[in-house]
Image (spheres, rainbow, N blue to C red):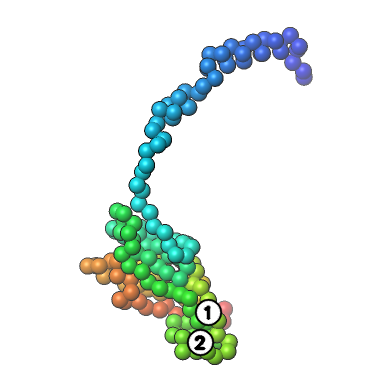
């Protein structure tokens, strides 16, 4: 159904009246124009050497999972408190996950691979612990026990979460 031609001038007059009342400006734009856009803000920031995959806030620390590293930052100014190197890792067919294969670096079949952080989580069921899983060593995870007196210490007690028996079972 078409609108009658007589309504078109009326709609035009209504729209014209509304536009004249607005003075060509929105109220929101007027409020925003009063802000001081020349002010410099000093916001805390952190720049990792490699791409960041995961970020966790626990207690007064920020845990950052990045390619080849896990960083611990304080939560107030994001300054680096600790760093744990997770890669690159030499993967060799004769090495099980969690086994140091750096001595096989000159043998054929070994490939150095970046360790991309695939999972990063905090578990507080028994003790506070950081679980990190990477893309190397068949996706093996590491369990970092966080000492109560120094939760930024992620390297003094690290356990590999790999079982060769489970890897050999099928299904």
37 vs 150, left or right, is right
- Percent across and percent down for residue 55 are 41, 59
- The residue that mark 1 highlights is 112
Q: Which residue: 31% across, 76% down?
A: 157
Say which element carries label 1.
strand
Residue drawn at x 51%, y 73% is 114
- Numbered label attached to residue 6: none
- Label 2 neighbour load within 10 Å: few <14, some 14-19, many 20+: some
- Where residue 28 sits in the image (x, y, percent)? 46, 27
Tell me, yes or no, if residue 165 can be seen here.
no
Compared with 96, 19 (above or below) is: above
Residue in view at x 40 percent, y 79 percent: 160
Q: Which mark is residue 105?
A: 2
Q: Is residue 118 left or right of residue 83?
A: right
Verify CB contact (< 8 Å) between mark 1 and mark 2. yes
Q: CA distance from mark 1 to mark 2?
A: 8 Å
**In x, y percent, where is residue 74?**
30, 59
Q: Is residue 136 visible?
A: yes
The quarter of the picture where residue 2 lies is top right
Q: Earlier in the sequence, mark 1 or mark 2?
A: 2
Q: In the rendered view of the protein, which quadrant contains the N terminus?
A: top right
Q: Is residue 138 above or below residue 116?
A: below
- Against 25, residue 167 (above or below) is below
Local secondary structure at mark 2: loop
Q: Position of residue 22 (x, y in %)?
A: 53, 17
């Amino acid at each position: 159904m078409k609108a009658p031609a007589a309504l078109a001038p009326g709609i035009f007059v209504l729209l014209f009246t509304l536009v004249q009342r607005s003075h060509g400006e929105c109220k929101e734009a007027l409020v925003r124009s009063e802000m001081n856009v020349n002010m410099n803000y000093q916001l805390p920031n952190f720049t990792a050497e490699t791409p960041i995959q995961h970020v966790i806030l626990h207690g007064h620390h920020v845990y950052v999972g990045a390619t080849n590293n896990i960083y611990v930052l304080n939560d107030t100014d994001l300054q680096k408190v600790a760093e744990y190197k997770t890669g690159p890792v030499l993967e060799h067919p004769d090495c099980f996950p969690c086994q140091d294969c750096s001595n096989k670096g000159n043998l054929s079949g070994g490939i150095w691979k970046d360790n991309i952080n695939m999972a990063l989580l905090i578990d507080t069921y028994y003790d506070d612990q950081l679980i990190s899983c990477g893309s190397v060593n068949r996706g093996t995870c590491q369990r970092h026990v966080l000492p109560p007196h120094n939760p930024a210490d992620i390297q003094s007690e690290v356990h590999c979460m790999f079982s060769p028996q489970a890897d050999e079972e099928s299904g």
